[in-house]
Amino acid sequence: MNISWYIVLSALLFTIGAIGILVRRSPMVILLCLELMLNAGNLALVAFSREVGNAQGQVFALVVMVVAACEVVVGLGLIVAIFRRKLPLDVDDLRSLRG
Amino acid sequence: MSATAWGWLVLLFPLAGSILIALSFRKTSWRTAGIIGTAAIGLAFVCGILALIKLLGEDPSSRHHASSLWEYASVASLHIELGIYVDPLSVFMVLVVTGVSTLIHLYSFGYMQSDQGYHRFFSYLNFFVFSMLLLVLAGNFVLLIVGWAFVGFASYALISFWYRRTTATRAGLKAFVINVVGDIGLTLAAFLIFQQLHTFNYTEVFAKAPETFHTNSWTVTAICLLLLVGAFAKSAQLPFHTWLPDAMEGPTPVSSLIHAATMVTAGVYLIARTHVLFVLAPTAADIAAFVGLATLLVAASIALVMTDLKRAIAYSTMSQIGYMIVGVSIGAYSAGMFHLMTHAFFKALLFMAAGSIISAMANEQNIDKMSGFGKAMKFTSVTMLCGALALAAFPFTSGFFSKDEILAYASARGGMYLIFTILGYFGALLTAIYTFRLIFRVLRGDPCAEAQHLIDTGHVVHAHEPTNPKTGEVEDTDVGFPGADHHIAEQSPPMKVAMGILAFLALFAGFIQVPGVDKAVTNFLNPVFADSPLASIEPSTTASWVGLLIGGLISVAGIGIAYYLYVASPETPRRLQERFSAMHTFLYNKWYFDEAIDILIVRPALAIGRFANNVFERFVIDDAITGGTEEVVGKAGQVVRGFQNGIVRTYGLFLIAGAVGLALYFLIQQS
């Protein structure tokens, strides 16, 4: 199968994720969109890996998964902390780091 | 041991004494500190004598030794050694400095007894002697400058010794600032010497100078004039003299040691040491001689009207140093050094006697309030009279031979230099008058209240509440003076011994150099000055004795005038003062030198400072330079702050837009 399909699919997934981050306000959904972008990257890595014929890309994808898992832990931890403090679950309202 | 080894020991003892006293002040009694201090200087004196014996055992032409402990700085072609130079001139100075210092330490041992700052005083005093010895023993110009600056500091520390007295701290600052002006001159001179001759070492400089410089060329004249700035500032010559009378705020032993016997003669030593350069720059030497002459006349005229006992003696010191400067500048090197030695004896003695009287007056220094101490304090009066006779060059005292030797040399050199002889004799007349004015007013007459108290009870008067006689402020006795008690020579054996020895020297030290009989000083110093063409000029024995005869007559005449004015007809001075009141005011205000310096230097400097503060600092630095920078950074910050709005999604947008922008950029580049 032509590699282009994989790349197009990866690009579509990445774009959906990016747009999701830009338009949605719920931290939960933003986290999901981030995950989507990471996996789009993974898809591209695996596809290239097969095309080139060595395993480096696949190993990289595994590393990205580990990083993604860590990121989810931190992100969910933050969401739980926000929820516990009865703060609004809306990223536009959480702007006390304004310069 | 070699002469240089003794030279190093001479330096070691006072330094060790100073450190030891300073570090042990909590553990030792005042007595121990005084003994350590006096013994350290005494040992240095002994080492000086041993160095002298060593030198005398050698052939006259090889009596100079350089020794270096280690190299202090070595960069490119610059090699500075921590080295000393031992020759008859430095040994002569070492003996005068340590000899007189030992006696003054002994005097201080009694005089400063009830001062709370006793340890501090002896530590400073030993440090001063160390610095002075470093100055005279230094083997190169760098070490000379180090010693030069050290004595300046020691002088500052000792003038301001009673640091709760505002007058004392001001006087200390004044002395320090004027001395630093001199240091600048000396440093620039050393720089020029290095630039021209590529060395700082005395031996090399003096060997190379005659080959490098043409007589009276600009460079050598500039070097000599800069050296003179240093010499004049340290030796209180016009126009740098105003610090010396103010320095009398310090304790009397300090006035005696630093501001009469040793430090102020450093300028004379400097000119004698660098005489090779001055021979090459006769113009500079003549300038020095004329400044010396002007100083000796101006200072003598001021001393005629001073009412402060110590200040009058201080002006007399300036005047006598004027003679020495004239001597070493016109070529009468050994005569100048001889006068330096005899002056150290009789001037130190006069200050000691003055200190004893001031103690008896409970710190009052005004001679208008003193009288009749001749009856109250016999020993002090007799020794003071010995010092005064020597200062007035009374026949056969030490000052008689030394002062007249300079004047006889000037007349032997002839021509223009006869001015120095004539005006020098006029100065000698003034000297005899002002000296005996002090003697007659302080020692004769009906005893004043303090003197009467001393006669009646045998005790010194105490002020109920000690005050500064200058300002009337109440003194803080916690840091010393006036302390619980005052000490006078009659009741303190160490003071008595010191003054007795000096009185003997003041009367009889002149006999080591009598024209036609012996000339110990000249013979000893001759190897140092043999290279100068001026050293071979020598007045004939007859001319010398004619000079001595004139000098003796002038001295006796001066004493006679003083007797007439202050004893026989005490109304005359007042009438003279009224008739010449403008003149008297002019002299009493010290020729308005302080005021002139204030207007010419201090005020312009302050005005420049005010301009720099109010205009330059405010408008150029604050507004234009720092203000401008601050505004640019602030404005830029305002703009950048706008992006930091706290909305995470905006940051995401910037991030993605940035990444897309970069990607587009590279894509366009590629295609």
Image: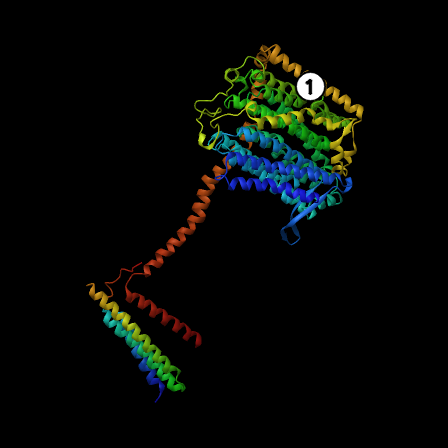
Instruction: Give the side of residue B647 with respect to residue B248, left or right.
Output: left
Q: Residue B590 location in percent, x, y?
A: 57, 24
Q: Residue B671 location in percent, x, y?
A: 43, 77
In the picture of the structure, the residue carrying the numbered disc 1 is B555
Q: Residue B149 location in percent, x, y?
A: 58, 40
- Residue type indicated by callout 1: Ser
Q: Is residue B235 visible?
A: no
Where on the picture, by quarter, is residue B541? top right
Q: Nearer the viewer, residue B438 or B130?
A: B130
Picture quarter with the N terminus of chain B? top right
Q: Secondary structure at mark 1?
A: helix
Q: Height in image: B193 above or below A52?
A: above
Q: Residues within 10 Å of mark 1 (few under 14, many from 20)?
A: many
Q: Height in image: B383 above or below B85?
A: above
Instruction: Give the side of residue B500 with respect to residue B24, left or right.
Output: right
- Name the residue located 65 percent from the left edge and 54 percent from the top edge: B76
| Coloring scheme used | rainbow
